[in-house]
């Protein structure tokens, strides 16, 4: 806090530190859930491409609801990352190890929610993401087949299991992980009216992405947060590139020590990982 007092009152860093990123993430999640309910009533996992296209063409305001679900989901995850970053920056939170692990598990839960949403689109991006994820699951030693049957099993079950995890399993997992935190902190709609209006305006003006099958292309990119991993798979075996390396920052975050010197080293390791992942993402974008 001493460092913050050296900054002018209107300094942008003061605004970043003071903004309620967690509340913005929660409000975005509410918008995502509400729009997701509308979409879910029209969605059929047995024919995802046709179902998603029909929502936009036939359902009342289907294009708006789908765009609202897409952009609010993106905002939820980005605000969640911002919230965690500011918490670590302030270094004011005091949690027990078990509470910290439970709270940090909301981040992979949110990422998997976002990822399964891409897969459920059934378009070129969704198919690429699902195929890569299934390949990674199968590469896990000893339990790869069981993991794939539990989470994906696309060949035999289509997107039915992915849909169940998206609308039930991951929502419950994330809710259980965040519940003690949500009981202490609330988010009020009236405090985020600008965010709500901006999300609605973007949803009206910018349709959600929907990519048809692109025949003849040798490279199809997955979701934006998946591009670095997709590029890494070009150089390393699936288990190492898709499981071990992505788990490194998660394990470091969960283990985050209290000792100042060790804590700084963990921060440095996570930042280096993020820089390398950004470079891999940029390389992947060049191939698109």
Image: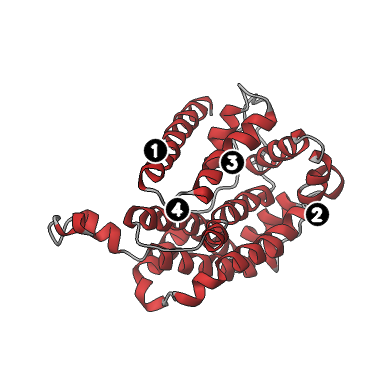
Quarter holding residue 147:
top right
In terms of sequence position, does the residue under pointer 2 or pointer 3 come before the other? 2
Q: In the rendered image of this protein, does residue 127 appear above or below residue 57?
A: above
The answer to whether the residues at label 2 and label 3 have Cβ atoms under 8 Å apart is no
- Measure the C-alpha gap from mark 1 to mark 2: 45 Å
SS type, badge 3: helix
- Measure the C-alpha gap from mark 4 to mark 3: 16 Å
SS type, badge 4: helix
Give x and y (percent) for residue 46: 80, 54
Report the residue at 53% width, 56% height from top: 104
Residue toward you, 116 or 248: 248
Does the image show residue 215? no
User: Marks 1 and 2: which is nearer the front?
Assistant: 1
In terms of sequence position, does the residue under pointer 3 or pointer 1 come before the other? 3
The residue identified by callout 1 is 268
In terms of sequence position, does the residue under pointer 1 or pointer 2 come before the other? 2
- Measure the C-alpha gap from mark 3 to mark 1: 16 Å
SS type, badge 1: helix
- Measure the C-alpha gap from mark 4 to mark 2: 33 Å
In terms of sequence position, does the residue under pointer 4 or pointer 1 come before the other? 4
Quarter holding residue 219:
top right
The residue identified by callout 4 is 81
Quarter holding residue 127:
top right
The residue identified by callout 2 is 46
The residue identified by callout 3 is 247
User: Marks 2 and 3: which is nearer the front?
Assistant: 3
User: Marks 4 and 3: which is nearer the front?
Assistant: 3
Give x and y (percent) for residue 174: 60, 63
Q: Is residue 22 left or right of residue 68?
A: left
Report the residue at 21% width, 55% height from top: 12
Does the image show residue 255? yes
Q: In the rendered image of this protein, does residue 252 appear above or below residue 163?
A: above
């Amino acid at each position: 806090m001493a460092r913050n007092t050296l900054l002018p009152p209107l300094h942008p860093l003061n605004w970043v530190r003071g903004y309620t990123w967690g509340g913005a993430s929660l409000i975005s999640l509410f918008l995502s859930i509400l729009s997701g309910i509308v979409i879910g009533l029209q969605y059929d996992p047995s024919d995802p491409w046709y179902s998603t296209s029909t929502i936009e063409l036939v359902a009342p305001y289907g294009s708006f609801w789908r765009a609202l679900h897409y952009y609010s989901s993106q905002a939820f995850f980005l605000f969640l990352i911002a919230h965690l970053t500011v918490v670590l920056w302030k270094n004011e939170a005091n949690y027990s190890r078990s509470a910290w692990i439970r709270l940090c598990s909301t981040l992979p839960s949110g990422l998997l929610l976002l990822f399964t949403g891409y897969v459920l689109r059934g378009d070129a991006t969704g198919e690429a993401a699902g195929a890569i994820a299934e390949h990674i699951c199968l590469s896990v030693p000893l339990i790869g087949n069981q993991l794939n049957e539990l989470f994906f099993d696309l060949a035999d079950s289509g997107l039915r299991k992915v849909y169940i995890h998206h609308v039930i399993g991951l929502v419950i997992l994330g809710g259980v992980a965040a519940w003690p935190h949500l009981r202490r902190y609330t988010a009020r709609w009236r405090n985020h009216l600008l965010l709500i209006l901006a999300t609605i305006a973007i949803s009206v003006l910018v349709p959600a992405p929907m990519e048809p099958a692109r025949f003849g292309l040798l490279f199809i990119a997955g979701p934006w947060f998946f591009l670095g991993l997709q590029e890494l798979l070009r150089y390393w075996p699936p288990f190492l590139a898709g499981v071990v390396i992505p788990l490194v920052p998660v394990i470091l975050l969960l283990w985050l020590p209290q000792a100042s010197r060790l804590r700084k080293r963990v921060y440095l390791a996570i930042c280096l990982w993020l820089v390398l992942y950004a470079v891999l993402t940029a390389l992947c974008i060049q191939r698109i």
